[in-house]
Amino acid sequence: MRAVAFQDILEKVKGACMAANFELGEDVIAAFQKAKEQEESPVGREILEQLLENAKIARKDKIALCQDTGFAVCFVDLGDEVRVEGGHLVDAINEGVKQGYRDGYLRKSICHPFTRKNTDTNTPAILHINLVPGDGLKIVVAPKGGGSENMSRVTMLKPSDGIEGIKQFVIQRVKESGANPCPPLVIGVGIGGTFEKAALIAKESLLRPLGSKNPDPALATLEDELLEKINELGIGPQGLGGTTTALAVHVAMHPCHIASLPLAVNINCHSSRHKEIVL
Ligand code: SF4
């Protein structure tokens, strides 16, 4: 068994919370750049230019890309030969989130659903822990904005709705969302599994680098078609019209029950953030 210190996990998660909020990924920046070259609306091009400038300032001055610094969603791959020394893994991650949001002057957005009383620490983090073989420990910290999360949906289609039903639902969801999720968007689509599995794989698919091709050719074709149709909606950057409503559509699939066709659409905003750490 390999021992990983509680404090090391805490420090790395703390740093990742700040880095994810300050440093937009190179893949997202490249997607902004490409979109700016292709965008037909002058206002849309100006907004994309401002997003590029915003990313530059955030990285240089170490300030948040957006005032909504999000829910701290963490995807953890925990090796079955790893032992956390000095405390519990979940506590180390939550303490890292708490300190990262405090020291990075990141807005604390987590509250009681009824009283709306803020927890003041941006915790608890949302943890997805996956047990994997080996002695590695990987954590991806993915701050998720409330505006884009609010526009996301899970539905249980009928098997007979098929692929056409899936396309219709995804496109309709983006259309109805309009400017609310802060376009240009990244759309995660989860097909199959159960109610919760569809939502999980949709969210996980947001982590895939923008511009990467889906390894399944049928899903790659579906992604291209959905992206084209979504960009034909004309919502545009920040909802002010244009040909760039989404930067990418990522589809993930899982086998499902013979009676079901679960579908999840997890919408991410232009502040499409995540940082990976390996311990
Ligand atoms: S949806 Fe995204 S860009 Fe819009 S306010 Fe929330 S974090 Fe910021």
Image (spheres, rainbow, N blue to C red):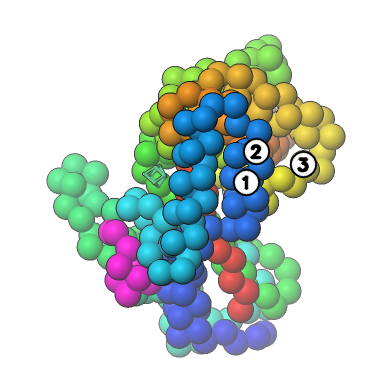
In x, y percent, where is residue 29?
59, 52
What's the distance in space between the residues labelled 1 and 3, CA to CA?
22 Å
User: Which segment is the magenta one?
Assistant: 100-108
Quickly name the residue at label 1. 33
In x, y percent, where is residue 267?
50, 36
Q: Residue extending furthest front?
A: 42
Front residue of 87/242: it is 242
Check whether the beta carbons of the residues at disc 2 and disc 1 lie within 8 A of each other. yes
Residue at figure coordinates x 44%, y 78% from the top left: 10
- Residue 37, label in figure: 2
Whereabouts is ligand 1, in terms of quadrant?
top left
User: Picture quarter containing residue 131?
Assistant: bottom right
Residue at figure coordinates x 44%, y 54% from the top left: 54
- Residue 214, label in figure: 3
Three-letter amino acid code of the residue under disc 3: Asn
The image quadrant where one finds the C terminus is bottom right
Front residue of 93/71: it is 71
Three-letter amino acid code of the residue under disc 2: Glu
Foreground: disc 1 or disc 3:
1
